[in-house]
Image (cartoon, rainbow, N blue to C red):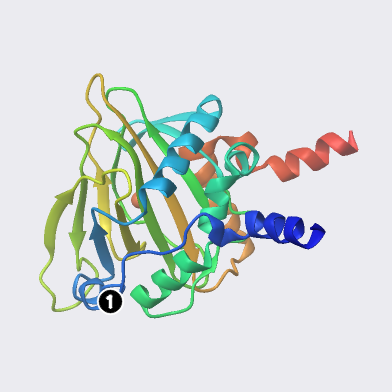
Amino acid sequence: MSTVVAADAASQDSPDTILASLPGPAPRAAFVSQGAFLYLDTFLPADVTAKLIAGVHAVEGAVNRNYLPGHKQGGSVSRHKIDELAPAIAQLYRSPVLIQWLETLCGEPLQPSPDDDPHAYALYFYTKPGDHIGWHYDTSYYEGRRYTLLLGVIDDSSCFLEYRLHTRDNNVRISEDAVQIPPGGMVFFDGDRLHHRITPLRANERRVSLTFEYVTNPHMRPLQRFMSNMKDAVAYFGFRQVFRQLLGKRTSQA
Ligand SMILES: [Fe+2]
């Protein structure tokens, strides 16, 4: 009897309890031909998407709003708040089924971002007219590549992800397109190779997406870590969420 209880407890703690399978096989040829980019309008099972939506409702009180005139407006929730309030999202981030599928897609081993990276997994809330982000790359401050998995969670909006392929590929013609990411859909790309933006939210619309960041080398030099933290503090999560460990140490020493 106690063995069964222990096994049940272990299975509930397993990252794979949230995700049994994904569409297969991973379409690597399409990913390569599009310059390290893939869009799928159907990716996660409906029950997993339902857990993500529940996670969104759990963190709504912890959204940090940011305004960077001319570039960005919207709300964000860092991995630290997700760990506290929506642990199923952190569980999905570490799912071996998910990571192995993405490794097959990109053709190289991936690792979760380190525990002190507030952007390892994060929710983006577009809830006010004009919420958007301008053209940018998801620049890697790590010594290796940084891949972004962007998952649709809630999309009652007219927002598009607009993107340009091959902007940094020699002798390949640049192509542009735009997609909406419905709940359960995804895009996956090498952050330094996809030029992209999200078009502005209109009145009475709402859009929540989830970003997962995976890296090929989790080491980051101190200056790059400082730059990455400053970007996350100013543009996404606020100084309290980003520098929480340092703030905590100072508080405990006071
Ligand atoms: Fe981005």
Q: Identify the image quadrant of the C terminus.
A: top right
Residue at the top extreme of this rendering? 204
- The one nearer the camera, 56 or 217, is 56
Picture layout, residue 64 above or below residue 28: above
Q: Which residue is mark 1?
A: 28
- The one nearer the camera, 225 or 10, is 10
Tag 1: amino acid: Arg
Are there few (<14), some (14-19), or many (20+) residues within 10 Å of tag 1?
Answer: some
- The one nearer the camera, 92 or 159, is 92
Which of the 4 image quarters holds residue 204?
top left
Measured as percent of width and height from the top left, residue 27 is found at: 26, 73
Which of the 4 image quarters holds residue 68?
top left
* Residue 119 showing in the rendered view: no
Task: Tell me if 73 is positioned left or right of 27 in this view.
Answer: right
Measured as percent of width and height from the top left, residue 180 is found at: 21, 45
Picture layout, residue 13 above or below residue 53: below
- For the point 23% across and 53% down, the residue is 41
- The one nearer the camera, 171 or 27, is 27
Residue at the front extreme of this rendering? 1
Residue at the right extreme of this rendering? 253
Picture layout, residue 152 above or below residue 144: above
Task: Tell me if 80 is positioned left or right of 156 in this view.
Answer: right
Mark 1 CB near ligand 1 (8 Å cut)? no
Task: Tell me if 210 is positioned left or right of 130 in this view.
Answer: right
- For the point 51% across and 44% down, the residue is 232
* Residue 243 showing in the rendered view: yes
Q: Identify the image quadrant of the N terminus.
A: bottom right
Measured as percent of width and height from the top left, residue 141 is found at: 50, 62
